[in-house]
Image: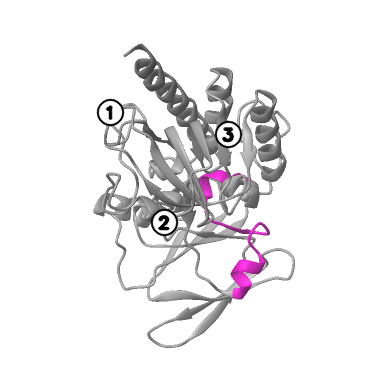
Amino acid sequence: MSQVIEHIKCLIVGSGPAGYTAAIYAARADLKPVVYTGLEPGGQLTTTTEVDNFPGYPEGIDGPTMMVQLQQQAERFGTDVRIGMVTAVDFSHEPGGHHRVTVDNSIELTAESIIISTGATAKYLGLPSEQKLRGGGVSACAVCDGFFYKGQDVAIVGAGDTAAEEATYLANICKSVTMLVRKDAMRASKAMQHRVTATPNIDVRYNTEVDEVLGDMVVEGLRMVNNQTGVKEDIAITGLFIAIGHKPNTDIFKGQLDMDDTGYLMTKGKSTKTNMPGVFACGDVQDKEYRQAVTAAGTGCMAALDAERYLATLESA
């Protein structure tokens, strides 16, 4: 272990709407926040071409530009934004205890309070043609991007409640929705399955997987394969939505912070407090229901306020 070189009053782990909003509030409260951005500075929004549903942008804005502006706003109030990834943590169980953090496997820090905003990573199929067209018609968020395909033919991959919900959402605004289910039945609840089968412009294809996403610069079609017969079929679509789940970025917190059975951090009541004193969680790392930029930003504000109140109780003790 290398020597501890720095003590931080408020450490924010991860960038994105949650982390940068927490930084804005923490900096204005004179908590002198330090943000470590992680491997993807700006979070998932940096892979989103158009953001039309975040308040305050009447003409819309592209994701990378929005995240640069959020970072600049946080820095304007004195936030120290650093490129680096937190690779290990050792949380204190005592109120007022200093939490130990390792960055990039080499830098040792301590912190009085920590705000975790490491987000969740959407799962993709891993096909080269799919990865090539991410941002060009391949999306992991129908609620975020479905609007751009209004009146068009699209497809969605998935079999759970999220996939069923997103399929019916897309069916309300798109001409047709082809739903690819890998097995011979959906995993979604019976109620959600009934909603899908009762929607006339959703075509459910069971035992069907993506063989290839067609198109050079944008999605132009989809080659499907029946995994029972091997028969392939091409359909013309302009958008492909992947709804096979998300993985919360919480591996380094296992064994220290309370999580649900899928790895999302659990917070107390309506707060952002975790089971460790002085450790708070915000954004998609603790929200598997909404996963929107605006809700992440809201919980980032909450985390900063919770951290400020926590630190104030230590000073008055």
Q: Real-space Cα distance between discs 1 and 2? A: 23 Å
For badge 1, the amino acid type reads Gly
Task: Give the image location of residue 299, x and y in percent.
Answer: 45, 30
> Disc 2 residue type?
Lys
Residue span colored magenta? 128-147
**Drawn side of residue 47 relative to residue 210, left or right:** right
| Residue type for callout 3 | Tyr
Residue at figure coordinates x 64%, y 48% from the top left: 46
Residue 130 placement: quadrant: bottom right
Secondary structure under tag 3 reads: helix
Residue 75 x %, y %: 67, 30
Within 10 angstroms of label 3, few (less than 14), some, or many (20 or more) residues?
Answer: many
Q: Secondary structure at mark 2?
A: strand
- Front: mark 3 or 2: 3
User: Residue 137 at what x, y percent from top left?
Assistant: 64, 59
Which quarter of the rendered picture does the N terminus lie within?
bottom left
Q: Which residue is mark 1?
A: 269
Q: Secondary structure at mark 1?
A: loop
Residue bearing the label numbered 3: 20
Q: Earlier in the sequence, mark 3 or mark 1?
A: 3
Disc 1 residue crowd, few under 14, some 14–19, many 20+, Cα 10 Å: few
Q: Earlier in the sequence, mark 3 or mark 2?
A: 3
Q: Would you say residue 116 is visible in this rendering?
A: no
95 sits to left or right of 119:
left
The nearer-to-camera label among 3 and 1 is 3
Outermost residue toward the top in this view: 316
| Residue 247 numbered mark, or none | 2
